[in-house]
Image (cartoon, rainbow, N blue to C red):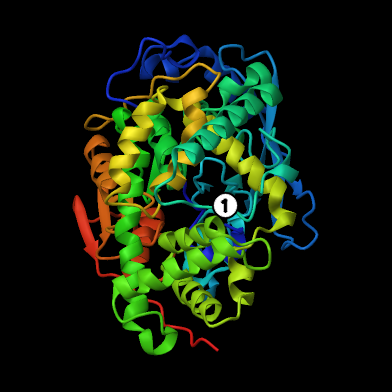
Amino acid sequence: MRAAALHSAAGALLLTALSAVPAGAVPADGAAGAPGLSRSPGVVLAAARAEAKGVDFTKCPGGQDLPGSMQCGKVSVPLDYADPSGRQIELTVSRVRATQRDPHNSKRRVPRQGALVFNPGGPGGSGLYFPLIGLLPEWKRIGAAYDLVGYDPRGVGRSAPLSCQDPKRFFKGPAPAPVHPSESYKRERIAQAKAYARGCAKRSGSALRHYNSINNARDLDVVRAALGEDRLTFMGASYGTYFGAVYATLFPSHVRRMVFDAAVNPDPAQIWYRNNLDQSAAFESRWADFREWIARHDDVYGLGRTADAVLRSYERARARLAAEPAGGKVGPGQLQGAFLQAGYYDDYWPARAQALSEYLKGDPKQLIAQAGPVREAAAEAENANAVYTAVECNDASWPTDWKVWDRDNTRLARVAPFETWDNVWANLPCAYWPAPRQRPVDVRTGPGELPPTLILAAERDAAAPYAGALEMHRRLSGSVLVTERDAGTHGIAGGPNRCVNGHLDAYLLEGRLPARRAACAAHAEPEPTAAR
């Protein structure tokens, strides 16, 4: 379930299962249920060690261009919590201390409330630069009260990085993106998925099975202990909401406050095959939203006065790129990827529409700049994709018969062609995965087990469809759901919506929540950018 890292307001800073469990699925590290998982001696021992050692924060590696207030350190966790004295891996953690200064009155001291730990999602997203978000006006009050803490989860970036192939081979372009792929193209992608799964196993060996959401939740508890926090204050975005909810289920007494931003559907039957089907369906609606916005600004872009007319312009560009890739590196696949990103964040809409308009008028420069692969980022992108694949494939059972994938997605592509097949190719290695599969945790808490938590969701979020927020709300007793109506940005905390931010600040700073559900009007649509 692919997701970008954080709300786009901070993007420039941060560089953004089937219903029945098959007999082959195994509980994590041999434990059969949530109590056993949370009380396992490995977690207790690792947390005790981390608490005794703490985190030695010093200058961040390669951080010469970062503000001096941000520091980094290491936290050791077991690769395998069933063998806590065996191989250890180090997680890189970052921190900016609470300023304890009221941003509206520099003479007023603000009480420190501990650490706020953040995860941006993915799986595979790095949270290492999250503490810099305190520089943004929307986050200054939170940054005054909390140490802002980010980290690279296991396998990501500087935390025992995972790899499945040579990064030099990761960007393949220009690439096709057939809406209705031929049988020969499907066979080609099946072969690639099998090879990728083999590459993950070859490069990681027996360690591969230990990259999963349950271990991410356990690692989070060890990070909590290392920071000296008796109870965790946590904010997760997108996938971060899922393993945050797993944490809340396994360690409810360790929770102080939790924010789930762009909540993923945690129903075990949805993890992850069905969640991806739902995501593909939701992107079709969001793609229509984008086209309708372009049509309303036809005087600026000239791409069509209706959503259907805009689609014809887009298809014309696809056909032209298939015949002659722009700059020799942007084909239909790269075009689709760039416009998929606009499905996450509507503040990408003006730039994408302008690039498409200029390309169709004969100037490809903006399209190449926005859609072309960034070779310098190949290692980072390959690592993120490897972790994404490993976690999702390890977390739950996936169909192992191609006919199931083909049937479900052929049917879906008839009504939702925009993302369906691209999503299939991203996840297909899970059909041929060599490591044992987990049995997903049954995320849920009973009355009084968990402190009140805050769930934030945009009603038209495609990457994390709104039904997931409703299911998260239903499963976490005492949670409160705040909805941004008629909006679709993926991750709304600290963005342009003052109503949403008011609820976020009230909760994190005062522990104050509205009734079980609250709603905010949508933030303003982006303004069009005039094409040259």
Q: Is residue 140 visible?
A: no
Q: Relative to residue 322, is residue 205 drawn left or right?
A: right
Q: Quadrant of the N terminus?
A: top left
Residue 339 lies, in percent from the top left, at 47, 63
Residue 192 lies, in percent from the top left, at 58, 34
Q: Residue at x 31, y 82 (%)?
A: 305
Residue under pointer 1: 147
Residue 406 lies, in percent from the top left, at 37, 34
Q: Residue at x 38, y 29 (%)?
A: 253
Can you tell which quarter of the image residue 344 is in?
bottom left
Comparing 423 with 454, the one in front is: 423
Can you tell which quarter of the image residue 165 is in?
top right
Within-10-Å neighbours for mark 1: few <14, some 14–19, many 20+: many
The mark tally for this picture is 1
Give the residue type that dot 1 points to. Asp
Q: Relative to residue 444, is residue 169 drawn left or right?
A: right
Q: Quadrant of the C terminus?
A: bottom right
Describe the element under mark 1 as helix, strand or loop: strand
